[in-house]
Image: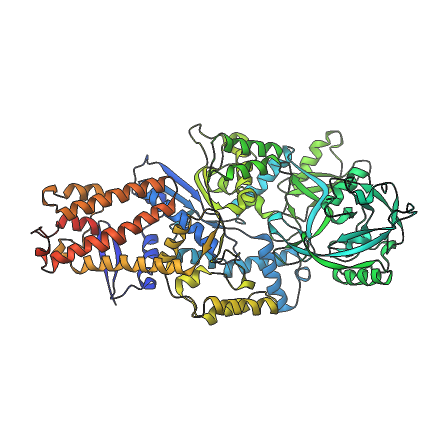
C-alpha cells in the first residue's frame, strides 16, 4: 500500500493509493487528521468573526453502554447537519457528552464487586462504593467515546461533559435549590413504580409490559339473595396481592351483579368480610369484576380514595410479605413463594377456579432487572409540572419550537396537557444526591422541617432564618440519602452547554432579546419526546425564559428487517461496530453469551443469529453505514434495518473510491494538479471554466450537477436528509460515473471519433469534478 498526501493551502490531507477500496484503511487517518487541525472547534472555523453560529447538543449515551444502532442513527443525522452548516460558513458547535446512567452504572459496578469479592455495596458502605464507581468510570468510560470517533462524528470535543463532573453537579444542585425555594418541589406519599431488585423507584420509561396469566378466584357472597348468585368470580394477574384486598368492585352497567352493591363477600383466605362497591371508573364491564388492592395498584389506590377504603400493604421494599397479624402464615416470604402458597391454599379452600392466558391484562416489569414492578405507597420528592408544561406546550403551538415531523405536535400537546407532577427522587447511591436536609429541633414543640441547601451549615442557617424568634434553637441536620432521577440532570444539559447560567441568581440569567433559543437544533429519537425533550423545554425555559432549542428533529425507532424490535434474546441486534469492522458468526454468538440471557433466550438468540447471518457481517466501514442510515430516514414510522441496504451503500462508496482513483491516475491528461487543490471553493472553480471550451457533454454534466446541488441544498435546509442523500447517490452513479467518466475515457484513450467533439473534455471542468 502506498500513502501520499494532498496539500490544501495550510494543511495536508491523507490520501491512500490502493488497488481496491478498503474502508478500514481509507477511514483510518482521517479522524486523527481532523482533530489535529481543530476542524471541529467553532473557534477554528473558516468563517468571519460575525458568522452565524449553529449549535447542537448530542443526546448523551450512557457511560456504561456501547454504541447501538440508535446512537449510530443519531450521530449520522447530526453529523450530516453539522458538516452541511460548516460548508455554509457557520460556526458549528456540536457538543458531546456522556450520562452518568444512575441505575445502569450502579448495577454494573454492584455485579462486578459481587463477582470479584463476593460483597455487596452495603458491605462496602456508600462512599467506598461510590469510589469504586469512579474507578470503573476511569477504566471503561472512554469506550463509547472511541466508538463515536470511529463512526466519524465531527464533535467539538473541547466542550465534552460528563453529567457527574463538578460543573454539572453544581448546576444540578443549584437548580434543585431554586426550584425548591420557589415552591415547585415538595415531598408527598404516593403510589410509585418500585423495583424490588433495584431497591428504587424507577421511571415510566424503564417499565415494560407483557401479557399476563389471569387466575380465577371465587368469593362467596354473605347472605345471598334468593335465586341470586352465591358467589362472585374474580380474575387477577397477581393472586399474591389478594392478601391486601379490601373491597370487591363491580360496574353499574353489568346486569349480572345488580343488587349486590352494599353486600359483602368472604375473603377466601383471610375469612373476613369485605364490601361490594360500585366503581365504573375502575371496572370494565367487558372484563367483569375486580378486587380492590389499594397498596399495590395505582387504579385501586384511586378507587380506595374515592370510597374511603383502608390501604393494606402486603409487600415491603424488599419484596417480602410484611409483618401483619393477618399474614402470619406468609410473613417474610418472597412474592413468588407467596404466590405458590396462595394458589395452593385457594385450591384447598375450593376457591381457585384455574387460570388462562389473557391479552387484555398485562404485567409491568422493570426493563433494567426484569423484575416485576411492585406499585407501592412511599414518600418521594416531586416537581410541580403543570405551569411549566403549559409554557412548553405554548412554545410549540406558537412556533417558537418547531417539531419535525409536524404530526408529533399532537403527541406533545396530549402529554403536556395531561402531565402529572414528576417524581424526581431515586433510592440509589450513584447519582446527584438530593441537596435537601431534614431539620430536627431539640425543642419537641417545633416540628421537623426540610430545607434545600448547599451544605449542612447552609441548611442550618436557612432553617434558623425561618425561626427568627428562636434564633438560638439547637437542631440536628441530616441530608436526604436519595439521589435525583437521571432525567432531571439531563434536562438541564442545554444550560450547561450553551447557557452559562446560575440558577441561584435569576438576575444573571437575562438573555439578549435577539436570542430565540439556547441552541439551534436538537435531533433525537421520538421515544424520548416527553421524558427528555419536553422536560428540557420546561426546565430551561423556566430558568432563562427562552427555549433550549429552536427546532426538534425526531427520528423513529430502528427495528430489524422484519419490523421486530431489536433484542438480544431474538438474536437480531445489529451492533454498529460489527457492521463497520466486520464480525464472524462466532463473534456475534460470543457477544450473546456475555449478556445476561436465560438459557432459553440464549438458545433462541443463537439459533436466530445462525439463520439470519450464517457468514457473520462483512466489513462495510463507517461511511457505508452512515449513508445507509441517512437513506433510511425516509421511513418515518419505524426504520426496518437490513444489511442489504448497507451492502448497497458499500458498493456506492466503492464507486466513489474508483472514481477518485481514476481521476488521480490520469491527473496529468485531465489537467488536474492533485498536489495543489485550491480551498477557495466551487465559485472560483466555476469562474475558471471557459464556456467556449465546454463540450456538449460538459454542459450536460454541469447542468445535472447544478440540478443536484439545488435539490441537495433544498433538502438539507428542510432537514430531509434521505432526499439529499438520494440526490447525491443518483448523480454520482448515473451522471458522473455511468456517463461523464465514460465520456472522459473515450477522450483519454483515443476514441474521440466516437463523438462529433474533436477536443478532449475541458480540463477545467475535469479539475472542477476532482475538487
Is residue 673 toward the left or the right of residue 615 in the image?
left
Q: Position of residue 4 (x, y in %)?
A: 23, 61
Q: Is residue 670 above or below residue 478?
A: below
Q: Is residue 350 above or below residue 423?
A: below
Q: Position of residue 448 (x, y in %)?
A: 76, 39
Q: Is residue 684 above or below residue 336?
A: above
Its colouring scheme is: rainbow
Q: Residue at x 79, y 44 (%)?
A: 250
Callout count: 0
Q: Residue furthest front?
A: 227
Q: Quadrant of residue 754?
A: bottom left
Q: Residue at x 35, y 53 (%)?
A: 35
Q: Tell me the quarter of the image containing the N terminus.
A: bottom left
Residue 526 in view, yes or no: yes
Residue 477 in view, yes or no: no
Q: Position of residue 693 (x, y in %)?
A: 10, 45
Nearer to the camera, 452 or 430: 430
Is residue 572 toward the left or the right of residue 684 in the image?
right
Q: Residue furthest top?
A: 513
Q: Residue at x 66, y 48 (%)?
A: 482
Q: Residue furthest bottom?
A: 586
Nearer to the camera, 122 or 321: 321
Q: Position of residue 475 (x, y in %)?
A: 75, 40
Nearer to the camera, 495 or 244: 244
Amino acid at each position: 500500500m502506498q500513502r501520499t498526501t494532498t496539500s490544501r493551502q495550510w494543511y495536508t490531507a491523507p490520501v491512500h493509493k490502493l488497488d481496491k477500496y478498503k474502508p478500514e484503511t481509507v477511514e483510518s487517518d482521517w479522524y486523527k487528521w481532523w482533530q489535529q487541525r481543530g476542524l471541529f472547534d467553532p473557534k477554528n472555523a473558516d468563517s468571519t468573526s460575525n458568522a452565524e453560529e449553529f449549535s447542537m447538543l448530542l443526546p448523551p449515551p450512557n457511560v456504561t453502554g456501547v454504541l447501538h444502532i440508535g446512537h449510530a442513527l443519531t450521530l449520522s443525522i447530526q453529523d450530516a447537519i453539522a458538516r452541511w452548516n460548516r460548508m455554509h460558513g457557520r460556526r458549528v458547535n456540536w457538543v458531546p457528552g456522556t450520562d452518568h446512567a444512575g441505575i445502569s452504572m450502579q448495577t454494573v459496578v454492584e455485579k462486578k464487586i459481587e463477582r470479584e469479592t463476593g460483597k455487596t455495596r452495603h458491605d462496602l458502605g456508600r462512599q467506598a462504593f461510590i469510589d469504586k464507581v469512579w474507578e470503573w468510570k476511569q477504566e471503561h468510560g472512554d469506550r463509547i467515546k472511541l466508538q463515536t470517533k470511529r463512526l466519524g462524528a465531527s464533535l467539538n470535543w473541547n466542550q465534552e461533559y460528563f453529567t457527574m463532573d463538578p460543573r454539572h453537579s453544581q448546576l444540578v444542585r443549584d437548580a434543585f435549590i431554586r426550584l425548591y425555594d420557589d415552591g415547585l418541589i415538595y415531598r408527598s406519599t404516593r403510589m410509585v413504580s418500585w423495583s424490588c431488585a433495584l431497591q428504587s423507584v424507577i421511571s415510566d420509561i424503564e417499565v415494560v409490559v407483557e401479557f399476563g396469566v389471569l387466575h380465577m378466584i371465587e368469593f362467596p357472597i354473605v347472605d345471598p339473595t334468593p335465586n341470586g348468585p352465591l358467589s362472585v368470580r374474580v380474575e387477577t394477574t397477581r393472586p399474591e396481592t389478594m392478601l391486601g384486598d379490601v373491597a370487591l368492585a363491580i360496574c353499574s352497567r353489568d346486569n349480572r351483579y345488580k343488587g349486590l352493591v352494599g353486600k359483602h363477600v368472604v375473603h377466601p383466605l383471610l375469612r373476613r368480610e369485605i364490601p361490594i362497591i360500585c366503581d365504573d371508573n375502575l371496572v370494565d364491564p367487558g372484563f367483569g369484576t375486580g378486587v380492590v388492592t389499594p397498596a399495590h395498584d395505582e387504579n385501586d389506590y384511586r378507587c380506595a380514595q374515592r370510597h374511603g377504603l383502608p390501604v393494606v400493604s402486603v409487600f415491603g421494599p424488599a419484596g417480602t410479605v410484611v409483618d401483619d397479624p393477618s399474614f402470619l402464615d406468609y410473613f417474610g416470604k418472597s412474592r413468588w413463594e407467596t404466590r405458590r402458597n396462595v394458589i395452593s391454599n385457594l385450591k384447598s379452600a375450593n376457591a381457585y377456579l384455574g387460570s388462562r392466558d389473557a391479552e387484555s391484562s398485562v404485567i409491568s416489569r422493570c426493563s433494567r432487572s426484569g423484575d416485576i414492578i411492585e406499585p407501592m405507597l412511599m414518600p418521594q420528592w416531586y416537581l410541580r409540572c403543570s405551569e411549566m408544561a403549559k409554557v412548553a406546550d405554548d412554545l410549540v403551538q406558537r412556533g417558537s419550537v418547531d417539531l419535525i415531523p409536524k404530526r408529533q405536535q399532537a403527541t406533545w400537546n396530549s402529554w403536556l396537557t395531561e402531565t402529572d407532577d414528576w417524581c424526581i427522587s431515586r433510592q440509589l447511591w450513584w447519582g446527584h444526591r438530593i441537596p435537601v436536609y431534614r431539620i430536627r429541633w431539640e425543642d419537641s414543640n417545633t416540628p421537623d422541617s426540610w430545607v434545600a441547601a448547599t451544605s449542612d451549615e447552609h441548611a442550618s442557617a436557612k432553617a434558623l432564618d425561618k425561626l427568627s424568634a428562636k434564633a438560638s434553637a439547637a437542631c440536628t441536620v441530616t441530608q436526604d440519602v436519595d439521589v435525583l432521577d437521571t432525567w432531571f440532570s439531563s434536562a438541564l444539559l442545554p444550560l450547561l452547554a450553551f447557557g452559562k447560567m446560575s440558577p441561584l441568581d435569576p438576575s444573571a440569567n437575562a438573555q439578549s432579546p435577539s436570542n430565540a433559543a439556547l441552541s439551534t437544533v436538537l435531533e433525537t429519537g421520538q421515544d424520548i419526546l416527553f421524558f427528555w425533550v419536553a422536560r428540557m423545554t420546561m426546565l430551561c425555559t423556566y430558568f432563562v425564559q427562552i427555549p433550549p432549542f429552536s427546532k426538534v428533529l425526531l427520528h423513529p425507532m430502528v427495528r430489524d428487517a422484519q419490523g421486530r424490535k431489536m433484542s438480544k434474546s431474538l438474536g437480531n441486534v445489529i451492533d454498529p461496530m460489527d457492521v463497520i469492522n466486520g464480525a464472524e458468526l462466532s463473534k456475534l454468538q460470543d457477544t450473546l453469551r456475555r449478556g445476561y440471557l436465560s438459557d432459553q433466550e440464549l438458545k433462541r438468540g443463537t439459533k436466530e443469529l445462525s439463520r439470519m447471518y450464517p457468514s457473520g457481517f462483512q466489513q462495510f466501514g463507517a461511511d457505508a453505514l452512515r449513508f445507509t442510515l441517512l437513506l433510511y430516514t425516509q421511513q418515518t414510522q419505524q426504520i426496518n434495518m437490513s444489511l442489504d441496504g448497507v451492502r448497497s451503500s458499500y458498493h456506492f462508496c466503492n464507486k466513489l473510491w474508483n472514481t477518485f482513483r481514476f481521476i488521480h491516475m490520469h491527473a496529468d491528461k485531465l489537467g488536474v494538479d492533485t498536489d495543489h487543490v485550491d480551498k477557495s471553493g466551487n465559485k472560483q472553480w466555476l469562474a475558471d471554466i471557459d464556456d467556449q471550451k465546454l463540450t456538449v457533454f460538459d454542459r450536460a454534466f454541469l447542468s445535472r450537477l447544478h440540478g443536484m446541488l439545488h435539490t441537495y441544498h433544498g433538502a438539507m435546509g428542510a432537514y430531509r436528509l434521505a432526499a439529499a442523500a438520494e440526490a447525491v447517490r443518483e448523480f454520482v452513479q448515473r451522471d458522473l460515473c455511468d456517463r461523464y467518466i465514460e465520456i472522459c475515457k473515450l477522450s483519454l484513450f483515443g476514441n474521440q471519433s466516437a463523438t462529433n467533439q474533436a477536443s478532449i473534455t475541458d480540463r477545467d471542468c475535469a479539475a472542477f469534478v476532482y475538487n
